[in-house]
Image: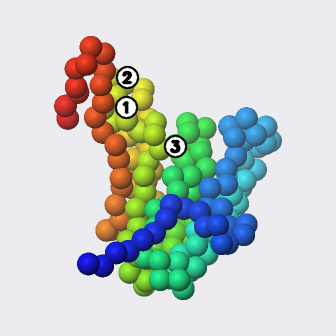
């Protein structure tokens, strides 16, 4: 039996290599001018993607072929404040590089949308936000050219009086 181990998003061996740097909504709103705001998002996203590429190069060198991407590669990607921002186009070279590294090294990659992604929620707002989050993950994989990447999700749950919701 072949056992392939991997890890989620962060390495303890590489310094200054977080692929999850972000900006809060409050800090984003304090930046003057829409172009300045988007430039800040682009800069953070490109740094996250460059760090992700570093992680994949490290993994390839150490024969680690399983990797789960962070959900936070693109800060505020699903927030209404950034609606209309085409982060895939702005960072297409960086996304393509990550996909190429994963493909060339036959890495099995995945993502795990955050805990608030609940497609079976009884609340319409939560369901709509969940769809936006799933679309984000799909767009990221498409931008990387990773057709065989996996998205891991939790579904099911108990809602009131012990009734199970079935999909």
- The crowding category of the residue bearing disc 1, from other C-alpha atoms within 10 Å (few below 14, some 14 to 19, many at least 20), is some
- Would you name the residue on which mark 1 appears? 127
In what element is the residue under mark 2? loop
- Would you name the residue on which mark 2 appears? 123
Q: Residue at x 80, y 41 (%)?
A: 32
Q: How is the image coloured?
A: rainbow
Tell me where residue 48 appears, x and y as whole percent.
Answer: 63, 62
Task: Work out whether mark 1 precedes mark 3 in sequence or the reverse, and give the earlier one.
Answer: 3
Taking the image as drawn, is residue 104 in sight? Answer: yes
Cα–Cα span, label 1 and label 2: 6 Å
Cα–Cα span, label 1 and label 3: 13 Å
Is 63 situated above or below 21? below
Task: Kindly indicate whether the residue at mark 2 contacts the one at mark 1 (C-beta within 8 angstroms).
Answer: yes
- Would you name the residue on which mark 3 appears? 78
Is 101 situated above or below 143? below
Q: Residue at x 64, y 67 (%)?
A: 12
In-front residue for pair 18/28: 18
Is 85 situated above or below 54? above
In what element is the residue under mark 3? loop
Q: Residue at x 53, y 83 (%)?
A: 62
Tag in front: 3 or 2: 2
Task: Work out whether mark 3 precedes mark 2 in sequence or the reverse, and give the earlier one.
Answer: 3
């Amino acid at each position: 039996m072949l056992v392939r181990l991997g890890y989620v998003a962060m390495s303890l061996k590489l310094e200054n290599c977080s692929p999850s740097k972000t900006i809060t909504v409050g800090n984003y709103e304090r930046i003057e001018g829409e172009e300045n705001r988007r430039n800040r998002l682009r800069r953070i996203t490109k740094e996250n993607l460059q760090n992700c590429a570093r992680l994949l190069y490290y993994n390839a060198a150490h024969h680690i072929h399983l990797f789960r991407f962070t959900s936070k590669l693109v800060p505020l990607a699903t927030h209404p404040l950034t609606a209309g921002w085409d982060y895939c186009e702005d960072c297409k070279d960086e996304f393509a590089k990550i996909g190429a590294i994963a493909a060339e090294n036959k890495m099995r990659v995945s993502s795990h949308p955050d805990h608030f992604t609940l497609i079976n929620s009884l609340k319409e707002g939560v369901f709509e936000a969940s769809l936006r989050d799933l679309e984000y993950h799909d767009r990221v994989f498409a931008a990387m050219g990773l057709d065989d990447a996996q998205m891991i999700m939790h579904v099911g749950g108990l809602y009131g009086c012990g009734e199970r919701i079935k999909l």
